[in-house]
């Protein structure tokens, strides 16, 4: 039984990762178009190109982490070594140099690519840590629940406070250079908090599960085993589709409220003396609803199974997303209600995915005798980034296709496109995710057998 403080410590790691991840998903596109000054189509292309390399880099990190040996374990050391670089590069990503357009494009490519590499280098080992903290699938479900709960708490805090911090540091100025400075300082605050959370995760967690073989298998064996791991392929596809769904919705939210709802006409909503814009509240409410989905995931999946829970949640999200298209700008009550319902569904699937990746590692070890936890979990990060890249690239390209013009009144065609970003397009991602997960073969009954056989083998080796 893992104690409460360690479960909380494990949650700190994804709280840190998710604060930046949500800033990327919700604000990086509009930062690049409206603050940094890049054309939307250029941003979409950049997201896709950089993700191709980054998707290859994730498994490289997993392979290196599997072969890391230190007094802190295989995966925990990366939390210690990379906490500060993670924050520094994040700040650089949201910094606008006073350069011509070509120079800014090069700077954006360089800093964004480096940010995603550092994100991989710390997040892949962090994700892999789940597979070695406990061999018990139910304990992993609990750890996944803590992880995702803290992830959404971090996202909630970041999304709720980020724009108020930007406005505070910008002093309400309309000058673009002052706004650029405000964005950078707001990210500095987030970066410091993230670094401290990673240190907390390192200090409070422990690695316990030892591989059946004392020596790590060859890279060739690891890759061969991975490519023959059918459940892994299924989760890879489902994860990419789920992130396409999430990234399109998050990336288009600020555009939806700025150009369709026209949140300036509704004014700021003041809570505890702090003025919040509608888009920030909408995103924060979604994160709070995600937490409810995470809390529901474990009891529901323990009752009806991970696979059925996942498929039911995605099916409901599909229907609700389609209905979302017909809301008028003044239907704020319905818009926020559907955000809550869709976000509950979205929140429930991610702890299931993480837990199923850990099951894939056990399944592979039983089948091959070789445990490559880092390589398997790197695919989860790869699917996250690749799915997010597809979603944001499609958003950027379609914004250009629909005739979007930054900081101008949009044409009807652009408005129709922005409405589709929160309805039909994410619904396509959920449908694809359902299709993949329908073939997932590792049921709860199957995993009990896998866990028992692995435990028996470990006892025999120790004897």
Image: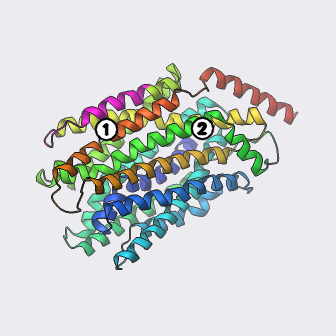
Q: Can you identify the residue that label 1 sits on?
A: 424
**Viewer-proximal residue, 226 or 90?**
226
Q: Is residue 140 left or right of residue 275?
A: right
* Farthest-out residue, front: 401
Where 109 sits versus 399, above or below?
below
Q: Residues within 10 Å of mark 2 (few under 14, many from 20)?
A: some
**For the point 67% across and 36% down, which residue is it?**
229
SS class of the residue under badge 2?
A: helix
Q: Which region is colored magenta?
A: 312-331
Query: Which label's residue is closer to the chain start, 2 or 1?
Result: 2
Q: Is residue 77 above or below residue 284?
A: below
* Nearer to me, 113 or 432: 432
Residue underneath mark 2 = 233
Residue 188 lies left or right of residue 451; in this view the side is left
Q: Residue furthest left?
A: 265
At 36% across and 32% down in the image, what residue appears? Answer: 317
Instruction: Report how far apart the C-alphas of labels 2 and 1 lie in the structure.
Output: 26 Å
């Amino acid at each position: 039984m893992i104690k409460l403080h360690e479960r909380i410590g494990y949650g700190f790691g994804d709280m840190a990762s998710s604060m930046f991840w949500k800033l990327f998903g919700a604000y990086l596109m509009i930062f690049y178009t409206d603050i940094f000054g890049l054309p939307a189509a250029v941003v979409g292309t950049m997201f896709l190109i950089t993700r191709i390399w980054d998707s290859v880099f994730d498994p490289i990190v997993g392979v290196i982490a599997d072969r890391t040996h230190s007094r802190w374990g295989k995966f925990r050391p990366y939390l210690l070594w990379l906490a500060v670089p993670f924050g520094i590069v994040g700040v650089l990503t949201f910094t606008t140099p006073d350069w011509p357009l070509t120079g800014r494009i090069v700077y954006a490519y360089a800093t964004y690519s480096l940010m995603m590499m550092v994100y991989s280098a710390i997040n892949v080992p962090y994700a892999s840590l789940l597979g070695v903290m406990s061999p018990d699938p139910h304990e992993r479900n609990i750890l996944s629940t803590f992880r995702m709960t803290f992830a959404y708490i971090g996202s909630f805090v970041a999304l709720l406070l980020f724009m108020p911090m930007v406005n505070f540091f910008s002093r309400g100025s309309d000058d673009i250079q002052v706004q650029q400075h405000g964005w950078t300082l707001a990210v500095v605050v987030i970066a410091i908090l993230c670094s401290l959370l990673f240190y907390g995760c390192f200090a409070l967690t422990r690695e316990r599960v030892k591989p059946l073989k004392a020596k790590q298998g060859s890279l060739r064996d690891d890759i061969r085993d991975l490519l023959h791991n059918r459940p892994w392929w299924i989760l890879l596809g489902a994860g990419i589709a789920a992130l396409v769904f999430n990234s399109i919705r998050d990336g288009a939210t600020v555009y939806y409220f700025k150009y369709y709802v026209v949140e300036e006409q509704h004014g700021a909503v003041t809570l505890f003396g702090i003025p919040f814009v509608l888009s920030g509240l909408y995103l924060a409410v979604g994160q709070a609803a995600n937490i409810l989905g995470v809390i529901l995931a474990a009891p529901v999946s323990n009752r009806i199974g991970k696979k059925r829970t996942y498929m039911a949640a995605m099916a409901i999200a599909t229907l609700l997303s389609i209905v979302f298209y017909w809301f008028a700008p003044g239907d704020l009550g319905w818009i926020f209600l559907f955000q809550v319902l869709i976000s509950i569904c979205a929140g429930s699937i991610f702890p299931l995915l993480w837990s199923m990746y850990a099951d894939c590692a056990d399944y592979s070890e039983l089948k091959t005798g070789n445990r490559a936890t880092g390589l398997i979990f790197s695919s989860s990060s790869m699917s996250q980034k690749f799915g997010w890249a597809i979603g944001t690239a499609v958003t950027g390209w379609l914004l250009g296709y629909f005739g979007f013009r930054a900081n101008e009144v949009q044409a009807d065609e652009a408005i129709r496109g922005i409405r589709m970003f929160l309805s039909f397009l994410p619904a396509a991602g959920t449908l694809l995710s359902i299709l993949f997960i329908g073939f997932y073969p590792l049921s709860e009954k199957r995993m009990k057998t896998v866990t028992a056989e692995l435990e028996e083998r470990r006892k025999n080796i120790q004897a």
